[in-house]
Image (spheres, grey):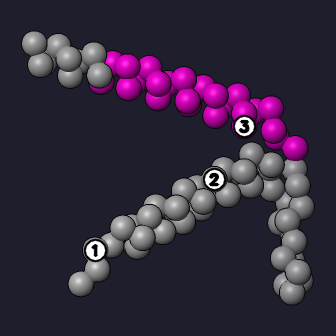
Amino acid sequence: MMEKFNFIIRFFGKIVYLIVALLLISFAVSNDNSVNITLFPFPFELNIPLYVVIFVVFVLGTIFGIVFNKFKNKPKD
C-alpha cells in the first residue's frame, strides 16, 4: 500500500515539475527582448535578455531568503 502511495506522489511531482518547466520555457520565449544593465560607478554595461535578468533576481532572492531563514531560526545558546 505504501509503495503505491509513493508512486503516486512521485508521479504527481513529475507532472508539477513538467508544468513548471513548460511555463518557464514559455516565459523565456515571450520575454526575449534585450535590456541594458548599467552599474553606476562602473564604466560598463551589459546587454542581456529580460528573462535572464528576471531569473537571476528570482534565484538571488530565493538564496537570500533561505540564508536569512537559516540565521533567523538558529537556536540561541
Please name the predominant secondary structure of the magenta segment in the image.
helix
Lower position in the chain sequence, tag 3 or tag 1: 3
Question: Is residue 57 on the magenta stretch?
Answer: no
Residue extent of the magenta highlight: 10-33
Lower position in the chain sequence, tag 2 or tag 1: 2
Measured Cα–Cα span from mark 3 to mark 1: 41 Å
Q: Which residue is drawn at 67% across and 57% down?
A: 57
Q: Which residue is drawn at 80% across and 56% down?
A: 48
Instruction: Please name which of the two marks, 3 or 1, marks the residue nearer to the observer.
Output: 1
Residue 56: horizontal and vertical position, in percent? 65, 56
Instruction: Residue 40: name its quadrant.
Output: bottom right
Q: In which quarter of the image is the N terminus?
A: top left
| Other-residue count near label 2 (Cα within 10 Å), few / some / many at <14 / 14–19 / ≥20 | few
Q: Residue at x 58, y 55 (%)?
A: 59
| Circles 2, 1 touching at the beta carbon (< 8 Å) | no
As drawn, 73 above or below 12: below
As drawn, 67 above or below 11: below
Which residue in the protein does label 1 denote?
75
| Other-residue count near label 3 (Cα within 10 Å), few / some / many at <14 / 14–19 / ≥20 | some
| Other-residue count near label 1 (Cα within 10 Å), few / some / many at <14 / 14–19 / ≥20 | few
Residue 28 badge: 3
Residue 24: horizontal and vertical position, in percent? 64, 34
Horizontal relation, residue 77 to residue 52: left or right: left
Q: Which residue is drawn at 39% across and 24% down?
A: 14
| Circles 3, 2 touching at the beta carbon (< 8 Å) | no
Residue type at mark 2: give it: Phe
Residue type at mark 1: give it: Pro
Lower position in the chain sequence, tag 3 or tag 2: 3
Which residue in the protein does label 2 denote?
58
Residue 2: horizontal and vertical position, in percent? 12, 19
